[in-house]
């Protein structure tokens, strides 16, 4: 289910996935009847032509492989995914990590495709592909244009059934996985989760990381992988899901052709749920020290498996306690007592078991006080005290998160596939929603008493090296302030898209309307020019701070009242600042338009800028700065722009410095907002809406705020004189390199189209960098290219995360690839691949309502036409290999490069 566990679902897959992907389980209500499973042989395939269009078809082939097909013609795309009951929980300790390594190896060649050819074929038609390993399953998936559905199905089944596992490629890929493992250990949340899983799931196959250990990964052999495939890759243990603009009969026939003739070689017995001991061994705690700025705390309690009838109530309990900014623990410890930078609670439920995870980030000098107060809170906590309003708000937001999975094709396919593979199909979702509707105070209290208990508590703490925090002291605090209780009474079972319109506004502002009637939601993006461009060097960080405080209350609503209102209406409202823009965005169910628009208007015209909220925002920004500098890439990108540029808004530290942020006053924020808000804005609205209401709202805001003092000027910045910057982050495993080349800005459409095409040729799993530096040389887990452009400036960056001993080799690898591009024109098939990637990326990244409103407002505010990106893609279709070669010679000359390194 798309539970409020995305934090943890992401964590588990971050530890493992070759290219991670979060699985959506619980999603929106399905209106079509739950399909009956049909068993088919090659001679007796059922006809699906007479079924309702959009129905979900479930057919079981003769060999037991299940096929799920759903028509969805909103986008010219098809999503194909294959689920296999083979994850880390099906391993033994001796081969820990084999599922994940196998997931890597399927990209290194099959009987039908050579190394890298799988990614190349999919990306060359404008598609994307990926795979992910979880505890309970591995999933392979592609998304392709509708005309390429056969290729998508062939690639996915080829990956699963025809791996070659070349010994030489295996040795190379093991090095890549070890680099990935090292990368994960540089991240606080990954270290926390690895520690907790070994405590909560001790002596089970959930105990070890999905990625495995250094010694087990290093020791894996081709015969072991082949034996693992023979054991677990059985047709009866698989689900093939195809969702999109398809003909169901053709899909079924193709599935039968591809995999219907495969045989099972052994039986499959579904695994039994893990028991939860009545008497726990806790509280138990582990402390890990490192060069961190903050303390990261993770507390976990075992809970039942994912299909348990207890899960809806546990999700409701987590949402109420720590699911969002309106939750009890967030309000208590973040807002009122100001002890933490962040605190949350989320359930992680797997096929055989689960955990309830509490996560907090705070300063070292507040740990004992916070832990004492949290334990007292838990000891006296009574879910029966939740108000009707809190319960209904939590229920609404959980239901809302399910519904929105339909917004993208990938989300819909993941939802349907997960339900069918690990639960009771679409009926399971209906059961879940029914069970959620039945959760009451008594049920919440029973679940709290049963599962959130000190004797089942496992605690992991990451601290700075000199922090005066001890594991023994923390367990002592728990024993003193949260005495164990007996389990509550015995468990009781519970069931369970049109064209744009533009409207001119007073003062030079503009309204853009993008109707899409697919979902009953409205997305709004409001952009101004300005942001960091309105600041002096001494004010760096002020635009970001203003954006953070703008949505923290109005003169009519306090910050907590505003949060309550948004949560009650399943709405979101946020503000951001960029190098040249300032933006406010909102998304909400269309039926709440009359309630939400006045609140947005008040946020813009009468923000409170309350001193207490300003102080909280300052501490949040300072905490974000410190946390970014705990992460190698966070450190690199924080300092990248001031390294590259010496003038203009690009030379500033976007979030400022801790000292500078601390000095800002409420008057500074109000003064900046006064200047920023007077500029003309562009408001783009996408989704379902009433045009008259939107025009009236936009006109009112324009008349109230806009008083332009002159046209905003985009800077033509001066580049830095120093060409190399070396940053150090001790006690990390990897080095991170960015080789950066100055380029023109977006106003040069001709150059931009060529640069985007060049970036597409370099990046991606089938890109030139990946094929050379990773596939051939095994230098890194991640290597890619990125293009950043403002209006008048830009840069192309080559990135690699590698071992500290491979820095020089990686730089030489960059030079080699660029040298070959300058010396030899790209083959036409590489150009074609890059063109298709540009097209495919564009449509895949612009499916959500908010992504489309954001694109329109951002382009218009910076002076570009609404169809700028499409014009760029059209021009790219005519770019020649000679033109790309000329761009490399002109802009990607290593002699012109800036080099940023982050090393241990």
Image (cartoon, helix red, strand yellow):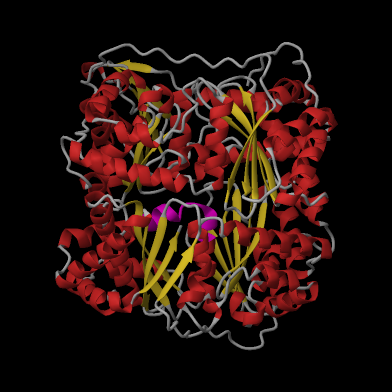
- Pinpoint residue 112: horizontal percent, then vertical percent: 16, 37
Residue 625 figure quarter: bottom right
In the image, residue 128 above or below residue 83: below
Nearest the eye: 32 or 348: 348
Task: Specify whether residue 183 is in view.
Answer: yes
Please say if 428 is above or below 691: above
Compared across the picture, whether 806 is left or right of 448 comes to left
On the image, the x and y values in percent for residue 872 come to 35, 69
User: Which of 178/44 is in front?
Assistant: 178
**Toward which corner of the image does residue 624 lie, by quadrant?**
bottom right
In the displayed structure image, the side of residue 850 where residue 393 appears, left or right? right
Q: Residue furthest bottom?
A: 710
Q: Is residue 214 magenta?
A: no
**Residue at 25% of width from left, 14% of height from top?**
265
The residue segment tinted magenta is: 841-853
Q: Position of residue 459 (x, y in %)?
A: 65, 34
| Magenta highlight on residue 848 | yes
Q: Residue visible at 37% across and 42% down?
A: 18
Residue 232 image-quadrant placement: top left
- The number of numbered badges drawn on the structure is 0
Task: Judge whether 521 appears above or below 696 on screen.
Answer: above
Q: Position of residue 501 (x, y in %)?
A: 53, 67
Residue 242 shows in the view = no
Q: In percent of the image, x 53 and y 54: which residue is there? A: 849
Quarter occupied by the N terminus: top right
- Is 628 situated above or below 191? below
Q: Main secondary structure of the magenta part?
A: helix
Please name whichever residue, 33 or 115, is drawn nearer the observer in this view of the structure.
115
* Residue drawn at 29 percent across, 66 percent down: 757
């Amino acid at each position: 289910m798309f539970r409020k566990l995305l934090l943890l679902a992401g964590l588990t897959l971050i530890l493992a996935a070759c290219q991670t992907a979060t699985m959506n389980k619980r999603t929106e209500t399905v209106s079509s009847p739950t399909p009956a499973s049909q068993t088919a042989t090659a001679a007796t395939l059922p006809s699906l032509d007479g079924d309702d269009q959009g129905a979900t078809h479930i057919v079981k082939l003769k060999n037991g492989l299940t096929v799920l097909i759903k028509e969805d013609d909103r986008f010219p795309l098809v999503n194909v995914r294959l689920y296999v009951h083979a994850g880390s929980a099906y391993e033994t300790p001796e081969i820990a990590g084999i599922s994940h390594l196998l997931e890597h190896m399927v990209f290194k060649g099959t009987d039908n495709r050579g190394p890298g050819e799988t990614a190349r074929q999919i990306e060359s038609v404008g598609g994307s592909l990926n795979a992910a390993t979880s505890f309970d399953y591995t999933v392979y998936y592609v998304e392709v244009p509708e005309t390429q559905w056969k290729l998508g199905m062939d690639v996915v089944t080829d990956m699963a059934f025809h791996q070659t596992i070349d010994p030489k490629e295996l040795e190379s890929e093991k090095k890549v996985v070890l680099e990935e493992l090292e990368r994960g250990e540089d991240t606080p949340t990954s270290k926390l989760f690895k520690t907790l899983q070994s405590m909560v799931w001790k002596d089970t196959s959930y105990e070890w990381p999905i990625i495995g250990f250094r010694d087990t990964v290093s020791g894996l052999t081709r015969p072991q992988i082949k034996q693992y495939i023979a054991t677990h890759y059985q047709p009866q243990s698989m689900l093939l899901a195809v969702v999109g603009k398809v003909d169901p009969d053709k899909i079924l026939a193709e599935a039968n052709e591809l995999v219907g003739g495969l045989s099972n070689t052994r039986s499959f017995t579904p695994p039994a749920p893990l028991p939860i001991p009545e008497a726990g061994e806790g509280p138990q705690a582990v402390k890990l020290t490192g060069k961190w700025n903050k303390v990261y705390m993770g507390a976990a309690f075992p809970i039942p498996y994912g299909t348990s009838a207890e899960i809806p109530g546990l999700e409701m309990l987590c949402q109420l306690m720590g699911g969002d900014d309106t939750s009890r623990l967030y309000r208590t410890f973040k807002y009122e007592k100001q002890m933490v930078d962040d605190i949350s609670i989320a359930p992680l439920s797997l096929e055989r078991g689960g955990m309830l995870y509490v996560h907090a980030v705070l300063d070292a000098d507040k740990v004992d006080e916070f832990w004492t107060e949290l334990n007292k809170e838990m000891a006296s906590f009574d879910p029966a005290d939740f108000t009707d309003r809190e319960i209904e708000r939590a229920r609404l937001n959980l239901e809302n998160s399910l519904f929105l999975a339909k917004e993208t094709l990938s989300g819909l396919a993941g939802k349907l596939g997960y339900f069918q593979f690990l639960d009771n199909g679409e009926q399971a979702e209906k059961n879940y929603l029914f069970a959620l509707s039945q959760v009451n105070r008594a049920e919440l209290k029973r679940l709290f008493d049963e599962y959130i208990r000190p004797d089942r508590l496992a605690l992991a703490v990451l601290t700075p090296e000199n922090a005066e925090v001890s594991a023994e002291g923390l367990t002592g605090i728990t024993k003193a302030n949260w005495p164990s209780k007996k389990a509550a009474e015995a468990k009781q079972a519970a069931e369970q898209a049109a064209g744009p319109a533009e409207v001119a506004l007073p003062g030079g502002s503009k309204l853009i309307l993008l109707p899409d009637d697919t979902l009953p939601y409205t997305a709004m993006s409001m952009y101004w020019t300005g942001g960091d461009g309105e600041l002096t060097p001494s004010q760096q960080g002020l635009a970001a701070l203003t954006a953070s405080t703008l949505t923290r209350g109005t003169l009519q609503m306090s910050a907590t009242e505003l949060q309550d209102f948004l949560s009650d209406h399943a709405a979101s409202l946020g503000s951001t600042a960029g190098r040249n823009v300032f933006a406010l965005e909102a998304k909400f169910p269309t039926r709440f338009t009359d309630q939400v628009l006045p609140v947005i208007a008040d946020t813009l015209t009468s923000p409170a800028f309350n001193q207490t909220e300003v102080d909280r925002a300052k501490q949040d920004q300072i905490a974000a700065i410190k946390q970014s500098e705990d992460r190698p890439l966070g450190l690199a990108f924080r300092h990248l722009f001031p390294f590259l540029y010496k003038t203009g808004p690009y030379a500033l530290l976007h979030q400022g410095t801790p000292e500078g942020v601390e000095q800002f006053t409420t008057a500074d924020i109000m003064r900046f907002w006064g200047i920023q808000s007077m500029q003309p804005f562009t408001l783009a609205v996408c989704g379902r809406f009433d045009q008259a209401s939107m025009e009236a709202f936009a006109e009112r805001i324009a008349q109230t705020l806009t008083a332009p003092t002159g046209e905003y000027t985009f800077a033509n910045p001066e580049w830095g004189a120093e060409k190399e910057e070396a940053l150090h982050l001790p006690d990390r495993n990897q080095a991170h390199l960015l080789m950066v080349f100055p380029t023109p800005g977006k106003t040069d459409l001709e150059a931009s189209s060529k640069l985007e095409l060049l970036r597409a040729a370099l990046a991606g799993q089938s890109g030139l960098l990946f094929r050379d530096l990773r596939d051939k040389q095994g230098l890194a887990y991640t290597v890619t290219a990125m293009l950043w452009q403002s209006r008048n400036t830009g840069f192309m960056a080559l990135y690699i995360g590698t071992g500290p001993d491979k820095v020089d080799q990686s730089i030489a690898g960059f030079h080699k690839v660029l040298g070959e591009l300058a010396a030899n024109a790209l083959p036409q098939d590489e150009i074609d691949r890059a063109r298709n990637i540009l097209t495919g990326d564009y449509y895949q990244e612009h499916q959500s309502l908010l992504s489309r409103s954001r694109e329109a407002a951002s382009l218009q505010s910076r002076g570009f036409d609404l169809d700028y990106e499409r014009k760029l893609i059209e021009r790219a279709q005519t770019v020649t290999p000679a033109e790309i070669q000329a761009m490399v010679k002109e802009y990607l000359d290593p002699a012109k490069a800036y080099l940023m390194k982050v090393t241990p």
